[in-house]
Image (spheres, rainbow, N blue to C red):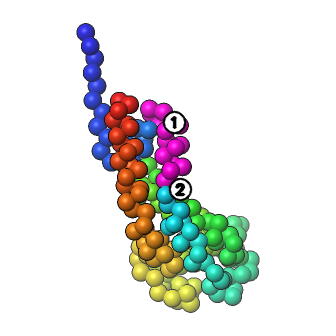
Amino acid sequence: MSVSTTITVVGVKDTINALKKIDPQLQKDFRTQANGIAQPAIKAGKEVYSQVPLSGMAYNWTSPGRSRKNFPFKVAKAKKGVQLRIDTRRNAVGVILVEQKDPAAAIFETAGRANPNKLGDQLGFVGPGRTRLIGPAVYRARRGIELEMEKMILDTQRVVRQEL
């Protein structure tokens, strides 16, 4: 008596999660390759930070009622905060993301996006779902990496199918 199973890998999330089930080292290799391919977009995201947006952002700033320090905005920390993240959660919006981890730079990128406020007014308009600098920079650089990333994902899907 033989037993057969069929596993279908539909998308990128499923492929990445299947890699972890097959062999955790395959998933680590995938993340390493994705990080290498995304370097032009990450570099473009880092290059947009060249100065402190507003002079007051260079000083310590704690939100009222909170003990967490949001500022000072430092260019070196803003550049270091641009990182690649692979998000395979069920409700994730994107799978392979270039995001800003530094709180001060993230506040700068999105202030005034949902609700008009003084900080957002001083920094300038940014539409809902948009960012000031990192989004447009990564969008311009993404054309150079899309084909390589797609090829790597298809190759990975092929490996997953062979392993199963």
Identify the residue at image location x=53%, y=55%.
Answer: 35
Q: CA distance from mark 1 to mark 2?
A: 19 Å
Identify the residue at image location x=29%, y=37%.
Answer: 8
Dot 2 falls on a residue whose secondary structure is helix
What range is drawn magenta here? 20-36
Residue 110 against residue 142 in the figure, above or below: below
Magenta highlight on residue 22: yes
Q: Quadrant of the N terminus?
A: top left
- First in sequence: mark 1 or mark 2? 1
Q: Position of residue 12 (x, y in %)?
A: 37, 49
Type of amino acid under label 1? Pro
Q: Residue furthest top?
A: 1
Q: Position of residue 116 (x, y in %)?
A: 48, 84
Considering the whole magenta stretch, tell me its main secondary structure: helix
Which residue in the structure is indicated by mark 2? Answer: 36
Q: Give neighbour class at mark 2: few <14, some 14-19, many 20+ (Cα, 10 Å).
A: some
Q: Residue furthest right?
A: 60
Q: Nearer the viewer, residue 3 or 40?
A: 40
Q: Position of residue 21 (x, y in %)?
A: 44, 33
Q: Nearer the viewer, residue 145 or 132?
A: 145
Q: Position of residue 46 (x, y in %)?
A: 59, 71
Q: Quadrant of the C terminus?
A: top left
Q: Nearer the viewer, residue 133 or 153?
A: 153
Which residue in the structure is indicated by mark 1? Answer: 24
Does residue 66 appear anywhere in the picture?
A: no
Dot 1 falls on a residue whose secondary structure is helix
